[in-house]
Image: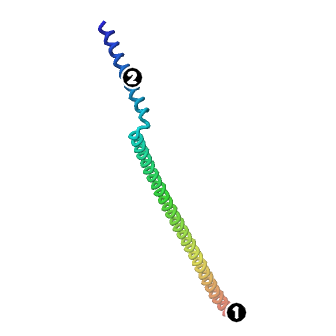
Amino acid sequence: MRKVAELAERRTTAEAAKAKLLEQFRARQATADDPAAQERAAARRAVVEAREAREAERERQREQKRAEIEAAEARARLEREAEEAARQAAAQAEAEAKRHADLERAKQVLALEADRKAQRDARYAARKARRQ
């Protein structure tokens, strides 16, 4: 019998607590027209608005920083591309100069060989002329 009495007592206590919570809730709703409640609600709204404003400012700063980083990356990419183009132009100019030098060297070698051939031919012709 003791257990049944404890169960009934716990049920009664729980029902009383629920009723008290319901009464407090209804009392809070009834005081919505109360100036103090309106002040608290206005204060809560002001806090929420301030929080939203801070979050918007942080987001704006994040966006600004992201844009600055993207701009810096774009500048760095352009600089790398310009350096690469300058390197390629220098390599091309160096290759052209080497080709030109090789051509000049080849012309000199050909001229030297033609001169040697002419001297050799002159010696052969002189030798042939002496024999006749």
Q: Which residue is mark 1?
A: 132
Residue in the foreground of this view, choosing between 119 and 48: 48
Q: Is residue 39 left or right of residue 92?
A: left
Q: Residue furthest front?
A: 34
- In the image, what residue occupies the spot 39% across and 22% down? 19
Residue in the foreground of this view, choosing between 105 and 75: 75
Q: Quadrant of residue 94?
A: bottom right
- Crowd around label 2: few <14 · some 14–19 · many ≥20 (10 Å): few
**Dot 1 lies on which element?**
loop
Q: Which residue is mark 2?
A: 19
* Mark 1 residue type: Gln
Colouring style: rainbow
Residue in the foreground of this view, choosing between 2 and 75: 2
Numbered badge on residue 28: none
- In the image, what residue occupies the spot 62% across and 86% down? 115
Q: Quadrant of the C terminus?
A: bottom right
Residue 88 percent coordinates (x, y): 55, 69
Q: Quadrant of the N terminus?
A: top left
